[in-house]
Image: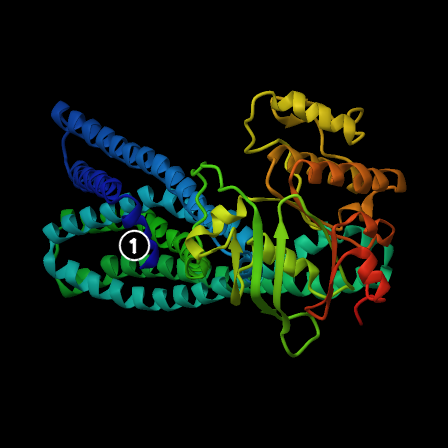
């Protein structure tokens, strides 16, 4: 039913027109059955009027089917595009923490395989509607021949349909299980592409990955899919058995219980044989609709989860400039999350910090101390569970959180590099970008034309420089760099700390750098040390070094 509601909610008018076209096709088919039976039982040569009527009915049958298929093909692609766009809009509006909990594999399967399954079901609607209309027209013709026989046939078919439905329902359950396994399978695909170097370097890890992760998941997916398809095949063959049984009853049993003239008996046999194809097609489409229903259920679950998680407005078409930035304050901010192999959640905070325009701050601490989480809270990607964030003394609420994020440009450790300067439209953008490419020592590697980069196939350090280029061109008030220099050679690392960062500071930008490069701590206005989610120190580099706090990493 959820699939039917989806079809009707997307285009009720289109579905009505399709139903009318299918009904007209069914009328044409009923007329064809009657005409064939009349010609078979006629002793003379068919007249010209009969021939023209046959041609008209045939053309009507083909034309109405074509109209239904053409209309639904356009509707299917439009609905598919709308469904994908709707999911992407929801994803863009979900807080990062909830999105991470949902998981990338589930989202990828929804956007690819699930949407494709729904498209297949939409494309199957015209022929399914036409087949249903043909069956309805055939039933009308059979009832005209003998209502008693039609009732008996209907009872027989209902009993057979009940058994058919049991097989189909069992097949649906297995398809749902196969669909859940596909989420895990996509997770393995991601591990394969992201961890290919580690798998090649470690034979035992590679073997376990193949034998346990891939083998187990693919086998489960295969097993459930085959089990579902077998039940659909059994149901399909059950329908064929019902037809042959029905023909046998008409030929051998019906003349014994009710006197029928040869014309009526021929009509029943011809009509039944003629209706075998449409009924098989209609029953066969149930497997397509079953896959689509399972996929739509998964999309609905993800969609509801996304909708329930939306706590901030994230428009893509609002372009007004953010308010002037002078001071950012964190007031008793806390955030809890669960780390691997730990029974209790890790608590970051309560943390109170101030950042001012034109200030360069280094954030240091050992692995797992909460630096990256704090950076995501500062940039508005994570929502504090307690406390508040203020800009120029004004508290940030859910409604203003996306406006707040527009103050920031960031290059995170797990950054993504787009192949164009997407979203940037300032005059002279290409010329400005080429100037930065020269400063970043990338002008011999990358060209730019109309905002598009000639290549992103570079080393990790060079890709980070391109990400820095994008951040520069965004010209935001607050810059965040998460271990940016870790992939740079010593020469460019020095350029980053002694030239690029001071240049941003001189332009009045606030700069927050997560780093372990203690040789450059003296360049910062402040050094904040984080340990076990708490601020261990916040002061100048000389003060922290004098207190013996800077060079002591967080405990493992």
Q: Is residue 459 visible?
A: no
As drawn, the residue found furthest toward the bottom would be: 343
Residue 477, by quadrant, is top right
Above or below, comparing residue 301 to residue 120 in the picture: below
Q: Residue at x 52, y 66 (%)?
A: 387
How far across and down, in percent of the image, does residue 434 sit? Answer: 71, 23
What's the coloring here? Answer: rainbow
Q: Is residue 160 left or right of residue 423?
A: left
Q: Residue at x 61, y 35 (%)?
A: 475
Q: Tally the marks.
A: 1
How far across and down, in percent of the image, does residue 386 sit? Answer: 52, 68
How far across and down, in percent of the image, does residue 228 sit? Answer: 49, 62
Crowding at dot 1, Cα within 10 Å, few <14 / some 14-19 / many 20+, comes out as few
Q: Residue at x 17, y 39 (%)?
A: 31
Quarter of the rendering occupied by the C terminus = bottom right
Instruction: Decide which of 348, 309 is in the foreground and name it.
Output: 348
Residue 552, by quadrant, is bottom right
Above or below, comparing residue 27 to residue 4 in the picture: above
Residue annotated with mark 1: 5
Instruction: Decide which of 233, 310 is in the foreground and name it.
Output: 310
Q: Secondary structure at mark 1?
A: helix
Residue 505, by quadrant, is top right
Quarter of the rendering occupied by the N terminus = bottom left
Q: Is residue 175 left or right of residue 338?
A: left
Q: Is residue 255 left or right of residue 280?
A: left
Instruction: Decide which of 174, 210 is in the foreground and name it.
Output: 210
């Amino acid at each position: 039913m959820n699939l039917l509601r989806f079809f009707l909610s997307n285009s009720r008018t289109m579905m009505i027109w399709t139903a009318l076209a299918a009904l007209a096709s069914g009328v044409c088919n009923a007329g064809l059955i009657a005409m064939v039976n009349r010609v078979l039982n006629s002793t003379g040569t068919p007249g010209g009027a009969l021939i023209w009527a046959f041609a008209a009915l045939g053309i009507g049958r083909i034309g109405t089917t074509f109209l239904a298929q053409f209309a639904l093909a356009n509707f299917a692609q439009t609905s598919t595009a709308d469904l994908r766009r709707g999911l992407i809009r929801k994803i863009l509006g979900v807080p990062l923490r909830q999105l991470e909990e949902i998981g990338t594999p589930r989202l990828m399967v929804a956007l690819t395989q699930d949407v494709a399954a729904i498209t297949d079901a939409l494309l199957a609607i015209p022929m399914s509607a036409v087949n249903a209309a043909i069956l309805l027209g055939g039933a009308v013709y059979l009832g005209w021949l003998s209502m008693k026989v039609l009732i008996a046939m209907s009872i027989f078919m209902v009993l057979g349909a009940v058994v058919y439905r049991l097989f189909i329902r069992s097949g649906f359950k297995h398809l749902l299980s196969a669909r859940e396994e596909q989420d895990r399978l996509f997770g393995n695909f991601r591990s394969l592409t992201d961890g290919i170097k580690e798998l090649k370097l470690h034979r035992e890890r590679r073997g376990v990955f193949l034998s346990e992760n891939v083998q187990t998941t693919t086998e489960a997916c295969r097993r459930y899919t085959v089990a579902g398809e077998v039940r659909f095949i059994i149901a399909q063959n059950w329908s064929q058995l019902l037809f042959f049984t029905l023909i046998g009853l008409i030929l051998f049993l019906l003349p014994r219980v009710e006197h029928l003239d040869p014309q009526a008996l021929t009509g029943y046999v011809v009509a039944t044989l003629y209706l075998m194809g449409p009924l098989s097609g209609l029953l066969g489409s149930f497997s397509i609709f079953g896959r689509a229903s399972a996929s739509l259920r998964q999309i609905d679950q993800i969609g509801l989860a996304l909708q329930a998680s939306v706590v901030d407005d994230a428009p893509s078409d609002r372009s007004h400039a953010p308010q002037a930035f002078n001071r950012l304050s964190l007031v008793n901010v806390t955030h809890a999350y669960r780390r691997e192999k730990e029974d209790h959640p890790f608590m970051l905070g309560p943390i109170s910090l101030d950042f001012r325009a034109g200030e360069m701050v280094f954030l240091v601490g050992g692995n797992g101390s909460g630096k990256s989480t704090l950076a995501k809270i500062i940039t508005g990607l994570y929502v504090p569970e307690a406390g508040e964030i203020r800009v120029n003394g004004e508290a940030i609420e859910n409604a203003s959180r996306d406006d707040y994020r527009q103050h920031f440009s960031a290059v995170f450790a797990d950054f993504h590099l787009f192949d164009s300067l997407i979203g940037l439209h300032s005059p002279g953008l290409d010329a400005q970008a080429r100037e930065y490419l020269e400063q970043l020592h990338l002008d011999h590697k990358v060209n730019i034309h109309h905002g598009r980069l000639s290549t992103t196939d570079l080393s990790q350090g060079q890709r980070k420089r391109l990400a820095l280029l994008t951040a520069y061109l965004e010209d935001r008030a607050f810059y965040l760099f998460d271990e940016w220099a870790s992939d740079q050679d010593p020469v460019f690392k020095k350029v980053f700390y002694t030239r690029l960062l001071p240049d941003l500071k001189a332009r009045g930008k606030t700069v927050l750098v997560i780093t372990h490069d203690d040789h450059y701590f003296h360049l910062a206005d402040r050094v904040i040390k984080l340990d076990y989610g708490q601020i261990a120190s916040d002061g100048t580099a000389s003060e922290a070094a004098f207190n013996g706090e800077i060079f002591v990493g967080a405990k493992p």
